[in-house]
Amino acid sequence: MKTFDIPDFYRSSIISPIKEFRRKNDKLKRDFKPTILDFGPVRFMIARHFGFCYGVENAIEIAYKAISENTGKRIFLLSEMIHNPDVNRDLQDRGVQFIMDTKGNQLIAWEELTTDDVIVVPAFGTTVEIQAKLAEIGIDAYQYDTTCPFVEKVWNRAAQIGQKDYTVIVHGKPMHEETRATFSHSKESAPTVVVKNLEQAKRLATYITGESPKEDFYEEFNGQYSENFDPARDLQRIGVVNQTTMLASDTQGIADYLKQVMIQHYQLTVDQVDDRFANTRDTLCYATNDNQDATYALLMHQADLAIVAGGYNSSNTLHIVELCESKLPTYFISSSEKMLDKSVIRHFNLHTKQEVITEDFLSSHRPATILLTCGASCPDAVVEGILTRLLSFFEEVNPVSDVMEQFQ
């Protein structure tokens, strides 16, 4: 796989060598056992796969290239390049400005842009409408396009099944940048509707079968369907694609459910399934799958708590947190600074969408066992910072150099 030129300050003298060691010894990625770092009074179990994925490293390389090649010019990102506060903060410190926030709200008016400005498209991609707006201004949206190749793969697959007269169902968060972009590109070639979860997919099924009147569809799926969408006409042939950062098992569950609905409603034989339901299994992102599978493997081990690092608006990280907190106490933090001291941690609560403070979060057991992982947009340096901060809370730990000898 291609290697990328990203700033050294995102790397780690602890985490990066571990990743490289595991990669060399498991090139086919079949070993999902966690890496164990035994420091004596505390042991860390680190997920097999985590951190910067191919798409994120590609985006970072292109963004910093845009900065180095355009000294003296104004440089804009359409929105956050990835959902990581450290990366976005560094880009802003270097003068990059954001045109929109993550929800699509305008921060800088289009009228303020000129043909001399440089635009960087974020890893989530962007909509057809915004591409047209940039072209109208005279700006090349493709000069520094960091759109993840696996997001583009979803767009291409949606276009392919749309050309075969299937309607595209997008499993994603309607307001997420990637889902907005995927929806925009999909509707160019096919009727398209977004479903948030299995519950909403089940509601969609009632319009497939005719159990619910189509008039109710427009209110129930307001803002989630393409122009002139007709549920009576457009739900007769369907295919499911996803926002690549969703839980792969959730997307597959939605696809499997809707496939069975089509089979039962139309009384299909095995040979007839493709007439009504498109096979889109190949659109699931490898990095999302690997990170989630590694998390499942991590959770097979006994531990006192889990620490998950990443941006609080990172969809793929949120799903990893969901998996962890279903098994054991889990603390979702953006950096080591959230551990205020050895007994107090400030962490993000998925349910209230706010940071909360927990006291006495570290186990009194010795040795304490901590699961450690992060999302696909989190730098190795952040994970190292969290690990070393946690080490500082324990006495008489084994030296890092001794523990790292196994990865030489």
Image (tube, rainbow, N blue to C red):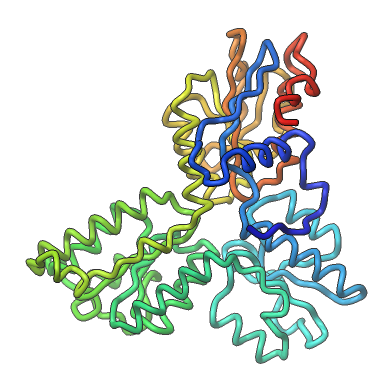
Q: Seen in the image, is 146 located left or right of residue 206? A: right
Identify the residue at horizontal 68%, vertical 63% (top origin): 59
Q: Seen in the image, is 281 located left or right of residue 362? A: left
Measured as percent of width and height from the top left, residue 323 is found at 45, 37
Q: Which of 163 and 254 lies nearest the eye of the viewer?
A: 163
Q: Which of 344 and 285 lies nearest the eye of the viewer?
A: 285
**Extreme residue toward the right, this view:** 72
Identify the residue at horizontal 66%, vertical 15% (top origin): 42
Decide: is 132 above or below 101.
below
Q: Seen in the image, is 196 located left or right of residue 12? A: left
Measured as percent of width and height from the top left, residue 136 is found at 66, 91
Q: Which of 343 and 18 lies nearest the eye of the viewer?
A: 18
Question: Quadrant of residue 125 in the image?
Answer: bottom right
Question: Quadrant of residue 196 in the image?
Answer: bottom left
Identify the residue at horizontal 69%, vertical 36% (top origin): 383
Measured as percent of width and height from the top left, residue 15 is found at 71, 36
Decide: is 87 above or below 47.
below
Quarter of the image with the C terminus in it? top right
Quarter of the image with the N terminus in it? bottom right
Question: What is the total number of numbered labels drawn onto the structure image?
Answer: 0
Decide: is 380 above or below 285.
above
Q: Seen in the image, is 280 located left or right of residue 68? A: left
Measured as percent of width and height from the top left, residue 294 is found at 50, 38
Identify the residue at horizontal 72%, vertical 72% (top origin): 120
